[in-house]
Image (cartoon, rainbow, N blue to C red):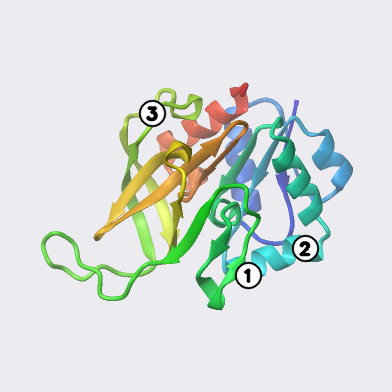
Amino acid sequence: MTIAVIDYGMGNLHSVAKALEHVTDENVIITRDPRCILGATRLVLPGQGAIRDCVGELERTELRGLVDDILARQGKPLLGICVGQQMLLEHSEESGGVTCLGTFKGEVKCFPDAMRDHHGARLKVPHMGWNLVDQRQKHPLWEGIDSHEHFYFVHSYYVEATQESDVFGTTQYGHINAHVAIGHESTFAVQFHPEKSSRAGLRLLENFVTWSP
């Protein structure tokens, strides 16, 4: 079995790969070679930075069509991480509006200014640090992880999926209930960074390695 971390020039590739290597003895590669990506058993789509740059690099490296095809066929397990989750939606408000891959119906929205917590304290954007994830539905990737576990976040934009059936986890930040884990068939995507989320994050990656959709 080979797990391919898709290298299109954006994302925390080596940290993700090292975390996967920590939880499995299977072959983990970082690659932009279409033959290696097509031949891999499982795929990870990372992302970090501005979504326009991420989508642009996916197109520049000529991997956009390949990823679109893999997502459309829905057979090979794929895990999206951070902007790798956001890119799977239809549209993002970032950078004046960006058309995304459209695997999931919904939009990526900007956290509003001047958000406050329930004590009235000002909340910072980006949302950075540890926060609780509420599991909305059971999923094999949640196996062995508490329903209100902490995961590590760094993001200024959040996912709002249209289909409730696609939402597997949410996080409250101010008055926003962000859809931080979404899934459909063989695709699962998270806003948080499992590779930076200690035991719970490693368990999610371990579950991904053994997941049979």
Helix, strand or loop status at disc 2:
helix
Helix, strand or loop status at disc 1:
helix
**Mark 1 is on which residue type?**
Arg
Q: Residues within 10 Å of mark 2 (few under 14, many from 20)?
A: some
> What residue sits right under mark 3 in the picture?
145
The C terminus lies in quadrant: top right
Q: Nearer the viewer, mark 1 or mark 3?
A: 1
Q: Residues within 10 Å of mark 3 (few under 14, many from 20)?
A: some
Q: Nearer the viewer, mark 3 or mark 2?
A: 2
The residue lying at 57 percent from left, 69 percent from top is: 50
Among numbered discs 1 and 3, the one appearing first in the sequence:
1
Among numbered discs 1 and 2, the one appearing first in the sequence:
1
The residue lying at 41 percent from left, 48 percent from top is: 179
Q: Please determine whether, in this image, residue 60 is positioned above or below residue 95.
A: above
Q: Please determine whether, in this image, residue 32 is positioned above or below residue 209.
A: below
> What residue sits right under mark 2 in the picture?
59
> What residue sits right under mark 1 in the picture?
52
- Residue 25 drawn at (x, y percent): 67, 25
**Mark 2 is on which residue type?**
Glu
